[in-house]
């Protein structure tokens, strides 16, 4: 997939017109207000995702117990889902905004994971820190190389198979999946499953600790807002001309499940924040000595 494969000279590929800046920046045809709203919500979701991790970074530096507050399986499931989402968004010919979000969040996950092992090694020094760092650098390298490989493959491939999202090209009502899109669809489905499963270890960790101390609620609040806007940006986008809405949703189904389906589990974590915060407040108000 090429984010901006079509230049201004090919603006005629948008027969119904488009906002010039949207075409120039994203290579997307924004033919009406729905498409413009899709792009706008997608941009806001990216800012939510970008800002969500910073409160947790600050919280980790203040408390120093990030390795106790966050579940390692939660972080591994999260980065696994984002990595699959990154690869799948390229292979399945997803919207550019989806790809931009996936690239950034893999990098943010790696930083979060690095902080986790940093505080874990400070608390309990281990000889395995070097291999872990090597794995993190390997994943970081793959995250950076994957877009380049995908871009090269898209340019070299036949236009009718590996084309970018030209939203107003004439397609049949039920757009067939290419081999590239099938692979991307499967990877996207795996990423959605990892997103959903990643929350379960964190919910369990919070339950066992009876506390959410060391976790920034802003992390989950901003992710919930970002996922909501992210899903809406996909749903508001007009299908390709001649493509049914059902076919369009089917092509984007794994990413919709990954973004909107995880909201339910994040809501449970939000309830845990509320319950355990009240419990901590009531325990602090109890007298130290019985009357």
Image (spheres, rainbow, N blue to C red):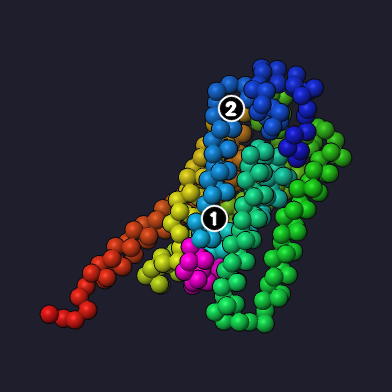
- Residue shown at 45% from the left, 51% from the top: 221
x 36%, y 57%: residue? 271
- Please state the horizontal and vertical placement of residue 169, each as a whole percent of the image: 72, 24
What residue does disc 1 label? 53
- Identity of the residue drawn at 67% across and 38% down: 96
Q: Residue at x 59, y 67 (%)?
A: 115
Instruction: Name the main secondary structure of what is drawn in magenta.
Output: helix
Q: Label 2 belongs to which residue?
A: 35
Foreground label between 2 and 1: 1
Q: Position of residue 119 (x, y in %)?
A: 56, 73
Quarter occupied by the N terminus:
top right
The quarter of the picture where residue 242 lies is: top right
Please say whether residue 241 is one of the residues in the magenta stretch: no
Marks 2 and 1, how far apart at CA: 28 Å
- Disc 2 secondary structure class: helix
Identify the secondary structure beneath mark 1: helix
Span shown in magenta: 59-73
Among the two numbered marks 2 and 1 on one chain, the one whose residue lies closer to the N terminus? 2
Find residue 160 and report its image quarter: top right
Q: Residue furthest front?
A: 62
Q: Is residue 14 above or below residue 249?
A: above
């Amino acid at each position: 997939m090429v984010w901006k494969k079509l230049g201004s000279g090919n603006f005629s590929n948008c027969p119904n017109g488009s906002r010039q800046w949207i075409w120039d920046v994203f290579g997307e045809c924004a033919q009406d207000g729905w498409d413009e709203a899709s792009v706008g919500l997608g941009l806001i979701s990216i800012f939510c995702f970008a800002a969500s991790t910073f409160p947790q970074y600050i919280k980790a530096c203040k408390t120093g117990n990030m390795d106790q507050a966050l579940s390692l399986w939660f972080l591994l499931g999260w980065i696994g889902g984002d990595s699959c989402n990154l690869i799948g968004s390229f292979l399945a010919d997803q919207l550019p905004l989806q790809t931009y979000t996936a690239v950034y969040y893999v990098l943010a996950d790696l930083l979060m994971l690095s902080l986790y092992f940093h505080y874990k090694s400070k608390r309990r020094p281990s000889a395995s820190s070097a291999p872990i760092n090597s794995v993190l650098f390997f994943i970081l390298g793959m995250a950076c190389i994957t877009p380049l490989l995908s871009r090269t493959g898209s340019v070299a491939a036949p236009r009718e198979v590996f084309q970018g999202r030209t939203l107003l090209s004439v397609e049949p009502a039920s757009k067939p999946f290419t081999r590239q899109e099938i692979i991307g669809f499967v990877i996207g489905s795996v990423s959605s499953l990892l997103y959903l499963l990643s929350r379960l270890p964190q919910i369990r960790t919070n339950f066992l600790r009876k506390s959410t101390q060391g976790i920034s609620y802003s992390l989950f609040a901003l992710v919930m807002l970002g996922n909501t806007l992210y899903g809406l940006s996909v749903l508001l986008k007009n299908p390709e001309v001649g493509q049914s809405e059902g076919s369009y949703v089917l092509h984007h189904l794994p990413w919709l499940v990954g973004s909107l389906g995880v909201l339910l589990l994040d809501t449970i974590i939000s309830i845990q924040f509320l319950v355990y915060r009240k419990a901590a407040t009531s325990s602090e108000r109890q007298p130290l000595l019985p009357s």
